[in-house]
Amino acid sequence: MRPLAGGKISQVLRIDFSDVDSMVAKTGDAGPDLTIEAYMLEALAERTDLPVPRVIHAEPDLLLMQHIAGADELGPPSLRHLGRLLARCHQASGAAFGLERDTLIGPLHQPNPPTASWIEFFREQRLIYMTGRALEAGELPPELETRLLRFAEAVADYLVEPSQPALIHGDIWRTNIIASGDRIVGIIDPALYYAHHEMELAYMRLFNGFDDEVFQAYEEIFPLEPGFYDTRRHVYNLYPLLVHLIVFGAKYLKPLDESLAWFGY
């Protein structure tokens, strides 16, 4: 056994055997229920073509998964491949926004009650919900909470309803992508639900996490409506900024403050 780079809560190990393929073990006695992560991986495998690891065994404090080899940097060919994979993933649609069960984003609970309106779902289950969690965690000053809740009441002025709910991975970040050569061979650590597909791309734009090749390849298959890059991505990224604030601390107060100020709140 040898340690792999893991999350904030769980320990992640690669386990090599003499007679069977290597596995990845994620453990966490005090962390979130790992059967939820197993559920999300299996749902992505069933409903999309994303190359997620096969789940071997799952219980609340132990998850065994297929090990996917690959350690190459993301270059233009693999970034374009990622864009195409995500565009096809987002064409998997559901009956409502949310999911048939609640999930996780990192170590945090993520509520997914099926909701007919995307704007209502984002306002109530993402922005207002995580604002409350950040306040409870002691990371959000009351003044900033007031501004976030005021903005939440006006969020319909900035967002649009999509034609259908899109299944999103929910936590596409470079450390969750495994590349080999010019292809993406693994995508891990989902935060699954049906959303506006722009939600995924907004997070990928946060902190300039991905180069333009991803978005160009994505839009060749699934073009974005005007206003995403200028306005809507900044609305959607209030949610991951709140998540980062709870998990990683006060350094994320400034980008939250600046985003709200940009909208005049």
Image (cartoon, rainbow, N blue to C red):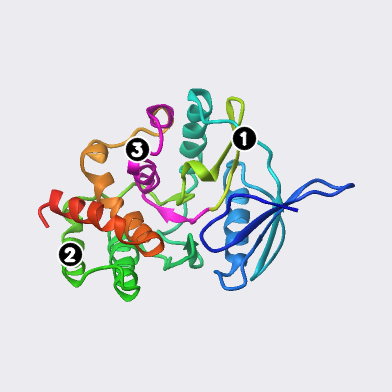
Q: Residue at x 57, y 54 (%)?
A: 6
Whether 209 is among the magenta residues is yes
Position of residue 189 relative to residue 134, above or below, is above
* Image side of residue 72 versus residue 191, left or right: right
- In the rendered structure, which segment of residues is drawn in magenta? 190-218
Crowd around label 2: few <14 · some 14–19 · many ≥20 (10 Å): few
Sequence order check, earlier mark of 1 and 2? 1
- Residue 153 marker: 2
In the image, what residue type sits under mark 2?
Glu
Position of residue 151 relative to residue 68, above or below, is below
Q: Quadrant of residue 152?
A: bottom left
Quarter placement of the C terminus: bottom left
Residue that label 3 marks = 208
| Majority SS type along the magenta span | helix
* Residue placed most toward the observer, 178 or 168: 178
Residue that label 1 marks = 71
Q: Residue at x 16, y 53 (%)?
A: 157
Distance Cα–Cα, label 2 vs label 3: 28 Å
In the image, what residue type sits under mark 1?
Ala
**Badge 3 element:** helix
